[in-house]
Amino acid sequence: MKIINRLMTNICSTKLVESRDFYVKLFDFNIDYDSDWFVHLISKDKQLELGIIDQKNEIVPVEFQTNPKGFYITFVVDNADEVYEIAKAENFEILNEPSDTFYGQRRLLIKDPNGMLVDVSSPIPNFNF
């Protein structure tokens, strides 16, 4: 059986600084590594990682140096409304304000500086299907 030791999502970006600041402000990541071609973010408990790479960097294959379609990233948080207030205060592009879904999540949709869809969800307490 194969064992996964680590899983990290990398976002390709033409706006490294803006992207770094977006994810740090919204999700309170620590900046573990910061350069002109790659940023590594890590949660305070060191369990979650997010990479942001210059999408024109030579290590990114040419066919992947464009913005992806049909992909979004979801952050499950304790309170989506708190993240909404931060996003509003920072003038981030909010696509949908927090609302309750039929599947038991309170969901907020934001566009990151790269145009990527970011889903911020929190469980609705005592929700029953």
Image (cartoon, rainbow, N blue to C red):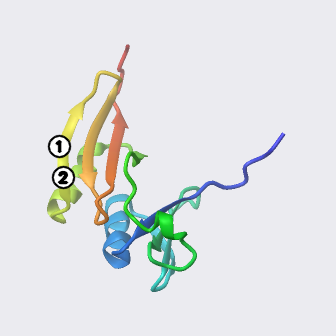
Q: In the image, is residue 102 above or below residue 11?
A: above
Q: Position of residue 76 (x, y in %)?
A: 41, 43
Residue 64 seen in this snapshot: yes
- Which residue is located at x 31 percent, y 66 percent? 22
Q: Which amino acid does label 2 sit on?
A: Ile
Kindly identify the amino acid type of the residue bearing the numbered disc 1. Glu
Most foreground residue, 33 or 85: 33
Disc 1: CA contacts within 10 A as few (<14), some (14-19) or many (>=20): some
Residue at the spot x=48%, y=85% of the render? 35
Number of residues whose C-alpha sits closer than 10 Å to that of mark 2, classed few (under 14), some (14–19) or many (20 or more): some
* 97 left or right, relative to 30: left
Q: Is residue 108 left or right of residue 34?
A: left
Give coordinates of residue 87: x percent, y percent.
21, 58
Quadrant of the image occupied by residue 67 = bottom left
* Residue highlighted by disc 1: 97
Q: What label does residue 21 carry, if any?
A: none
Which image quarter: residue 23? Answer: bottom left
In the rendered image, the residue lying farthest to the front is 63
Q: Is residue 107 positioned above or below 125 on the image?
A: below
Q: Which residue lies at the image location 50% right of the left edge and 77% below the top edge?
A: 38
Placement of the N terminus among the 4 image quadrants: top right
Q: Estimate the spatial distance between the alpha carbons at disc 1 and disc 2, rounded to whole Å.
A: 7 Å
Q: Residue at x 33, y 51 (%)?
A: 118
Viewer-side residue, 114 vs 128: 114
Quadrant showing the C terminus: top left
Q: Mark 2 points at which residue?
A: 94
The quadrant where residue 91 appears: bottom left
Q: Do the residues labelled 1 and 2 touch (CB within 8 Å)?
A: yes
